[in-house]
């Protein structure tokens, strides 16, 4: 990579990629972008980004290529074939995959002698589409230290510098991200169930939540994240439940690959898959809470005015 500001190629301009590219552009990086939906690039192109028809063309014109795609299959599709990244990438370029994926994706490239010399990082993120838009993502990086240091300015344009963590060798970033998601989606199911059962037992929802927060059973999910549902009935359509189920499936696959049991996670995954079936692929990632609301017969909502009075 030249010592001047690198040209960034970005593939995948969805809920996450759209905000991330806007922040790269704001930080002064030149962008070459592509997506299966050309309309997704309109604003970026109006602000000076170059549109490329294929991932290979993106790679040919870039020093650093970032992918932010839904699943490992999409990443493989963008990488390989005559129009793929690997057909256009220069031998000393850097590929950063920021999708939530599995260690095998990075390893298949690292271990392929045809791509010796290529710099590869896995750098998946947390922080939702809001964090992507605000440039406050948490980023978990797997790969070589020199590449992480070299790429820090690029990553800092998209994430919170305090929470950009180098977590190990190739694939470690993907693994940490899967652990984070699995624990968060487990908190979601446990919280929804407890709030629904407590409400059915006649306890006021606000009193119940406050009591739990004041107890050893408190969690970040209960204190903060669940409020988007309890306050506004917002199940976060910025992250589709189909992708959430993909992540939980990847976690269960990884536990199988490493030979560890994951009974609880397998059950949590099934509950989220039930919600996906009930409310559709594009329903928000927190839709499993709706399953419990439907069983209860009323939505779990706080009377905001009461909460303010007693706060
Ligand atoms: P999304 O479905 O909104 O966007 C994906 C984009 O990729 C779409 O615009 C699609 O057209 C494009 N695409 C798919 N295949 C392509 C290809 N071969 N070439 C070019 N473009 C292609 O997904 P998202 O919500 O932005 O999520 C992206 C990744 O980030 C996923 O791995 C997801 O698990 C992860 N993630 C999402 C969130 C969130 O809150 N949405 C949070 C953390 C991590």
Image (cartoon, rainbow, N blue to C red):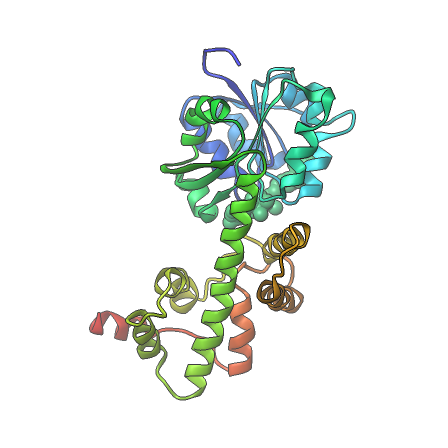
Q: Position of residue 124 (x, y in %)?
A: 53, 40
- Residue placed at 52% from the left, 29% from the top? 44
Q: How many marks?
A: 0
At x 45%, y 76%, the residue is 194
Image quadrant holding the C terminus, namely: bottom left
Query: In the displayed structure, does residue 241 sit left or right of residue 305?
Result: right
Q: Position of residue 193 (x, y in %)?
A: 49, 75
Farthest-out residue, bottom? 202
Residue 257 in the image: x percent, y percent? 68, 50
Say which of 146 and 27 sits in front: 146
Q: In the depicted view, which residue is nearer to us: 119 or 227?
A: 119
Where 305 falls versus 11 (above or below)?
A: below
**Rendered view: 4 above or below 229:** above
Residue at horizontal 52%, vertical 47%? 177
Considering depth in this image, is 178 or 254 the residue closer to the camera? 254
- Image location (x, y in percent) of residue 150: 46, 21
Foreground residue among 64 and 164: 164
The part of the image, by quadrant, that contains residue 69 is top right
**In-image side of 169 versus 226 (left or right):** right
Q: Quadrant of ligand 1?
A: top right
Query: What residue is rendered at 66% in x and 34% in y?
Result: 107
């Amino acid at each position: 990579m030249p010592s001047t500001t690198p040209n960034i190629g970005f593939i995948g301009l969805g809920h996450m990629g759209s905000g991330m590219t806007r922040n790269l552009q704001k930080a002064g990086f030149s962008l070459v972008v592509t997506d299966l939906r050309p309309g997704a690039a309109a604003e970026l192109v109006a602000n000076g980004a170059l549109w490329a028809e294929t991932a290979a063309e993106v790679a040919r014109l870039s020093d650093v290529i970032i992918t932010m795609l839904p699943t490992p299959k999409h990443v493989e599709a963008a990488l390989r074939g005559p129009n793929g990244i690997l057909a256009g990438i220069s031998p000393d370029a850097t590929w950063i995959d920021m999708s939530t994926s599995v260690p095998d994706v990075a390893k298949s490239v690292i271990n392929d002698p045809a791509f010796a010399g290529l710099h590869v990082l896995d750098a998946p993120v947390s922080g939702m589409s809001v964090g992507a838009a605000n440039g406050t993502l948490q980023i978990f990086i797997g790969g070589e230290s020199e590449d992480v240091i070299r790429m820090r300015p690029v990553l800092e344009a998209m994430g919170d510098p305090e929470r950009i963590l180098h977590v190990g060798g190739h694939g470690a970033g993907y693994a940490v991200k899967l652990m984070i998601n699995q624990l968060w989606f487990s908190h979601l199911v446990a919280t929804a169930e407890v709030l629904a059962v407590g409400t059915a037992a006649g306890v006021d929802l606000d009193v119940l939540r406050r009591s739990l927060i004041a107890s050893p059973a408190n969690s970040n999910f209960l204190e903060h994240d669940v409020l988007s549902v309890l306050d506004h009935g917002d199940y976060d359509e910025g992250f589709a439940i189909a992708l959430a189920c993909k992540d939980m499936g990847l976690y269960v696959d990884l536990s199988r690959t490493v030979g560890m049991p994951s009974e609880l996670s397998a059950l949590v995954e099934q509950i989220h898959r039930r919600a996906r079936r009930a409310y559709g692929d594009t329903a928000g990632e927190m839709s499993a809470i709706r399953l419990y609301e439907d069983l209860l017969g009323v939505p779990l909502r706080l009377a905001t005015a009461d909460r303010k009075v007693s706060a």
